[in-house]
Amino acid sequence: MGIIVCQSCNKAIDVFEGEKVTTLYAKGNCDNCNTNSKSKDNK
């Protein structure tokens, strides 16, 4: 089992099945970061 984590906010983006337990960090922003940046731009 593994977890994909957003590098920007450390929020878990996805969970996947695998033989080893691992954590992968995504380079891009997750939906949460994209939503936060859009709301900041609107202010």
Image (cartoon, helix red, strand yellow):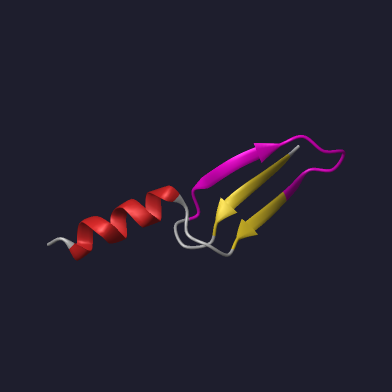
Q: What segment is highlighted magenta in the picture?
A: 10-22
Give the camera-side residue of 11 and 38: 38
**Quarter of the image with the N terminus in it:** top right
Q: Residue drawn 78% across and 43% down?
A: 21
Q: Residue at x 49, y 48 (%)?
A: 11
Residue 24 image position (x, y, % from top left): 68, 55
Q: Residue 26's x, y, as percent?
A: 60, 59
Q: Identify whether 19 is placed above or below 8.
A: above
> Taking 17 as reference, is 6 above or below it?
below
- Image point 47% across, 59% down: which residue? 29
The percent coordinates of residue 23 (x first, y second) are 69, 51
User: Where on the picture, by quarter, is residue 39?
Assistant: bottom left
Which corner quadrant holds the C terminus? Answer: bottom left
Q: Residue furthest left?
A: 43
Name the foreground residue: 37 vs 5. 37
Q: Is residue 40 left or right of residue 29?
A: left
In front: 31, or 7?
31
Q: Is residue 15 left or right of residue 22?
A: left
